[in-house]
Amino acid sequence: MRIHSMRSNSIRKFLYISPFMVLLAIFAYYPLYGWVYAFFDYMPPIPLSQAPFVGLRWFRSLVENQVKVDQLLQVIKNTFGMSGLSILFSWLPMIFAIFLTEIKAVRFRKFIQTVTTLPNFISWVLVYSLAFSMFSSEGVVNGFLSQIGLIDSPVLFLQNSDHVWITMWIWATWKTLGWSAILYIAAIMSIDESLYEAAYVDGATRMQVIRHVVLPSMLPTYFVLLMLQIASFLNNGLEQYFVFQNAFNKDTIQVLDLYVYNLAMGGGSYSVSVAISMLKSLISVVLLFSVNGLSKMLRGEGIV
Amino acid sequence: MSDNQTGLAPNAANNNRRFSKKIKMQVSTTDKLISVAIYIVFSLFAFICVYPFYSIIINTISANDLSAKGEIVFLPKGIHFQNYIDVFKIPGLWNAFVISLGRTVIGTLLTVGASAFLGFMFAQEDMWGKKFWYRFTIITMFFNAGIIPWYLTMRSLHLTNNFLAYILPSIVAPFFIILVKTFVESTPKELQQAASIDGAGTFTIFYKVILPISKPILATVAIFSAVNQWNSFQDTLLLVTDSKLYSLQFILYNYINQASSLSTMVNLQNAGSTAIASLSTKQTTTSIRMTVTIIVVAPILLVYPIFQRFFVKGIIIGAVKG
């Protein structure tokens, strides 16, 4: 009897959360059903139910159709370029945190931390708006440069197709550097005081303390974040690249997420777009599992 | 923050205060150089982070023809506030403001409520299939179908051009659930047990015991959630074509784009001619664009200094778990 009531109690508890699980099923799991579009020749406004089934045609077109292959290669190159850059510089927030905590003037340090974290909380549209106000042909930077007589005609920073990977990396860094450093700052704050004291007693210089005390204590955090970053290698996101995209930089700015969007919403090729989306999601899952496995092997515990 | 400490601000960097009592530190020249370099680099970066905001603010209150020419660099010239009055006369802007505010308020309330309840429920020992449902929730952080499949299925659910599309998908938010669950698990178990012995049911415990003690973490969730809602752009981009449902972010994007195509056009047609650069239409695009930018960013700028510590707390709790 008692066991029965405990069981019904635990089921009742599940019933309380079930409406939320339904919401989750609809908005996070049901979209997986959208993958079926990849196997049909879907052309709106003809509904999916009347669209012809084409099997793997779209997947084959990704490797057989020369135009598509070239496009996709360029897009993959961009994706690797931008994700590669951010992984290459993934240690920056750690260095930022180390040197920030070296500042002993508390108020100055807090000010720097507050100010550099701010950009993380504005949207990419706003970042673009700021970028536009600063760097467009009639923007502040061009105004300033021509005022002091350095240039005669405005420099077209934003319509430039060169260095797009680097400028995108710079904007992302501007937006997130201060915020990403917070985790490392927390790690530094939790370092045992006696470690510092021991180091100073041994006559260590400041840089030696950083190298032998501070840095090692942050490496576990760094490792986990790096692994997560590698796992989301293909997911650059859409917004940043979408807002900065224009006719001039389109070739070098299209990452997978943006390409998929442009194909469907710009070109109406929903089915191909879904096919690429699907491959991307599957590869991402494989990446996540590999990285998780690697982490288990190296440090005995997974990252997720 | 105590004031007497900051009195020795400039030279304090040379002096590791933490240990100065115990060990007389040898301050070498290299250490001094490092300190100076640190101050310079961080000051520069802070300037780069703040200046764009500052610059746009002073431009919106300066004479529009000067600001269109990019002549307002460090100080405002010809101060006036007409832009902020005029900008609300633009058809659609007030409406977009209401939409953004509405989705922020309603969305945040629902997300906070759901995160609190689910975080509490997932901290319960005896829920049927607890482990499975928790995983079912968390996995969605790492895996999604992709935006186009998402768009297609949302459309089939008639959530295009529908205000609910701004609210419903964000109600169950795995990251916030983790935050609350971690917090609830860190509170003494006896609190819940005592209430349970007194005959309180699940909802009563949630409402009378958990909600009051979870206020700090719920504040964090509320701030994160409100910022997300206010900043959200992609859902409007994908799901909304009805201008009555445009959010402020989306309207701002449209204004920048108009200005962009306009200026590009003018630049290509009249390379180097400054007479064209002061066209009145061009001025208004600049001033409108900047003023709308400030209106869109103002809530964040106002709220941010007050709630900064909640953000910090949130990411640290989240990281301990994640």
Image (cartoon, coloured by chain):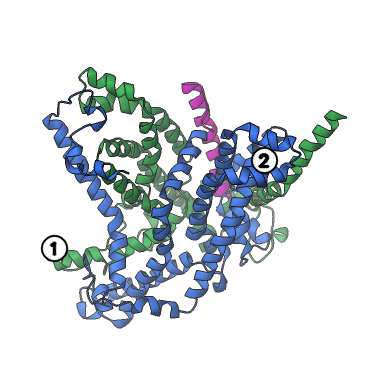
Chain colours: A green, B blue
Q: Amino acid at mark 1?
A: Leu
Residue plotted at (67% across, 63% down): B158
Q: Is residue A36 above or below residue B129?
A: below
Indicate the quadrant where residue A44 lies.
bottom right
Indicate the quadrant where residue B57 lies.
bottom left
Question: Residues in magenta?
Answer: A275-304
Q: Amino acid at mark 2?
A: Met
Looking at the rendered structure, whether the residues under marks 2 and 1 are on a common chain is answered as no
What number is the disc on residue A103?
A: none
What number is the disc on residue B121?
A: 2
What number is the disc on residue A150?
A: 1
Picture coordinates of residue B318, whole percent (x, y): 50, 39
Which sits in the foreground, A55 or B65? B65
Picture coordinates of residue A222, whole percent (x, y): 40, 32
On the question of residue A22 being in view, the answer is yes
Secondary structure of the residue carrying tag 1 is loop
Q: Main secondary structure of the magenta part?
A: helix
C-alpha separation, residue under disc 2 versus residue under disc 1 = 64 Å
Q: Is residue A95 left or right of residue A56?
A: left
Secondary structure of the residue carrying tag 2 is helix
Picture coordinates of residue A35, whole percent (x, y): 63, 49
Q: Is residue B309 above or below residue A264?
A: above
Q: Which residue of the protein is positioned furthest toward the right in this rendering? A: A1
